Image (cartoon, helix red, strand yellow):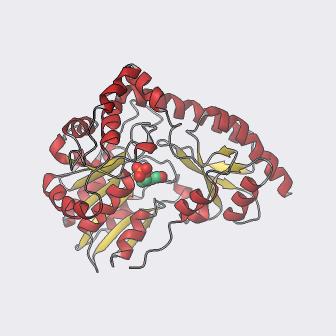
Amino acid sequence: MYIEPFGVEQWMNEYETRCRYNLAETCCDSITVAELLDLAGVGRGYLDGLLSMKLTYGDIEGSGRLRTAIAALFEEQSSANVLVTHGTIGANHLVYLTLVSPDDHVVSVVPSYQQHTAIPESLGATVTRVPLREEQGWALDLDELDAAVTPGTALVTLTNPNNPTGALLEREELCAVAAMCDRVGAWLLADEVYRGIDQEGSGTTASVADLYERGISTGSMSKAFSLAGLRLGWVVGPETLLERVVVHRDYNTISIGMIDDALAALALEHAETILARNRALVRSNLTILSNWLDGEDRVGWTRPTGGTITLLRYDADLSSRDFCVGLVEGPGGVMLTPGSALDVEGHVRIGYANAPEALIAGLPLISRYMDGLG
Ligand SMILES: Cc1ncc(COP(=O)(O)O)c(C=O)c1O
């Protein structure tokens, strides 16, 4: 089976461990096990409970404790609506394997995480791309989406908050998208891995799983919870769907590591504490980024409203890959992500949720690099 190479993941593999200032990072500044225990308000003795844990396959679909804690991130869900997976990446893959057959029609809002076009295409589906446009502030054109969703559309898919723009769809827009799906009986998959750290208000916008009977939410511990190292995510949706997803999951997952399950459950039982830390982080870091942009007229943007990343439009006569390679291999060692890896040439993606020191040191180095481009 052919599948196109995953541009962003290849770029990350190439430079992530070699750069000096990682402004390509998409996770909120990751935490250690000790920091997790501190945030959860439990002592180091908590780990003693892990010492007596017999390392079997554990609860195959995720422990009841963990699934209950995941369900609590939603308005209308119970543990029966939750299936634990190997990250959001595993969750998305399983949903496509379950719902997409050759010749199906899938509608995908782009730019997006490449899984959402490449996997359905590799499964033989026809994918209609509905573009977000910079001149519209990366906002979703609901009329354009409505026109793309036709009788026979099996699945509509989007990332919310959007990767890479950081644009957020609020409840009313999600309801409008759900109504379009309902009109033709399509499933709606929202990759909500960046949910919970929006720039305004409570920070947590509505989930499609709560808004639509065929709504599916995927997410994980990686971004808003700073725990990518657990490699733990979920599919949240109707039980009838999960029964079908499990058939595929039995072939490629069996279960998630028991230690990961236990630490994720602990973290999610203190979700609000971790999200509050990370909301404060993304909001203050965005001010740092915004202040730099105020004084840097060779770089433009649309201010993001959610998530940890956004697109920057640079004024220089070279491809986004050459721009990023020159920057990361130069004396500053600053890593961004080229727009070419996301199908948005002329832009670079910045992650602004890493430790503030990386932004404070890295942003002026981007200006210095651009000075040298002439
Ligand atoms: C939109 C989106 N979905 C899924 C993933 C994969 O994340 P996870 O670590 O949960 O597998 C990423 C990672 O960058 C992402 O940006």
Could you tell whether 249 is left or right of 42 in the image? left
- Residue 313: name its quadrant: bottom right
Q: Is residue 351 left or right of residue 334?
A: left
Which x, y percent locates residue 208?
A: 28, 49
Is residue 154 or residue 227 the one in the foreground?
Answer: 227
Image x and y of residue 146, in percent: 32, 64
State whether residue 221 is above or below residue 164: above
Looking at the image, residue 371 sits to the left or right of residue 162; the answer is: right
Is residue 338 at least partly visible in the picture? yes
Q: Position of residue 215 (x, y in %)?
A: 24, 53
The answer to whether residue 222 of the structure is visible from this angle is no
Residue 169 located left or right of residue 329: left
Front residue of this view, candidates 350 and 128: 350
Vertical order, 109 against 46 (above or below): below
| In-front residue for pair 125/47 | 47
In percent of width and height, residue 353 lies at: 55, 39
